[in-house]
Image (cartoon, rainbow, N blue to C red):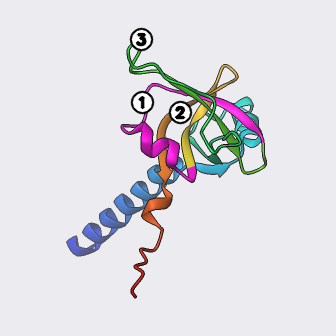
């Protein structure tokens, strides 16, 4: 075999290895019931859950437990998934801006169930201000 053939085979093998290792870490977008089912089956991969924060009649977000003076690394909040199920989730990485968090239209939590609690490692926000069109009235 020529040396160039060996190099090509090594490059292909490395590519396949990278693909396989990255596909094992790929997470899924599911609701809370499916996430709990996955956890009970023994799968401990991270899972994405998309939801909204519950709001009262005046539009204020409810259900946030966060006291940075007591513990800046703990926050719990309620999240309503796309099927309408409300679930308490906890995180040790609160978002840097609580204002943006409360204003967000949708919230994506990335985590897994641990002992019947959904533990979040990352929080992604979709803020409406980033997607609104700026209109200017001209007279």
Residue at which label 2 appears: 120
Residue 11 appears left or right of 50: left
Question: Which of the two discs, 3 and 2, labels the residue nearer the N terminus?
Answer: 3
> As drawn, which residue projects farthest toward the bottom?
139
Q: Which residue is drawn at 37% across and 62% down?
A: 15
Residue 21 in picture, x, y percent from top left? 45, 49
Cα separation between marks 1 and 2: 8 Å
**Foreground: 15 or 131?**
131
Residue 135 in picture, x, y percent from top left? 43, 77
1 and 3 marks in contact (CB < 8 Å): no
Q: Quadrant of the C terminus?
A: bottom left
Residue 105 in picture, x, y percent from top left? 57, 53
Q: Would you call the spot at circle 3 few (<14 residues within 10 Å), some (14-19), or many (20 or more)?
A: few
Q: Can residue 25 be seen in this view?
A: no
Q: Residue at x 69, y 39 (%)?
A: 56
Name the mark on residue 129: none
Quick check: 7 above or below 100?
A: below
Residue at which label 3 appears: 70
Name the mark on residue 93: 1
């Amino acid at each position: 075999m020529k040396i160039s053939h060996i190099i090509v085979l090594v490059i292909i093998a490395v590519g396949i290895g990278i693909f396989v290792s990255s596909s094992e870490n790929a997470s899924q977008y599911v609701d809370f019931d499916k996430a709990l089912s996955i956890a009970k089956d023994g799968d401990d991969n991270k899972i994405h859950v998309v939801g909204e924060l519950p709001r009262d009649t005046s539009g204020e977000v409810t259900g946030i437990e966060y006291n940075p003076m007591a513990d800046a690394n703990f926050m719990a909040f309620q999240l309503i998934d796309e099927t309408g199920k409300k679930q308490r989730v906890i995180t040790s990485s609160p978002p840097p801006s609580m204002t943006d968090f409360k204003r967000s239209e949708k919230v994506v939590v990335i985590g897994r169930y641990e002992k019947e609690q959904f533990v979040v490692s990352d929080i992604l926000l979709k803020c409406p201000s980033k997607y609104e069109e700026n209109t200017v009235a001209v007279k």
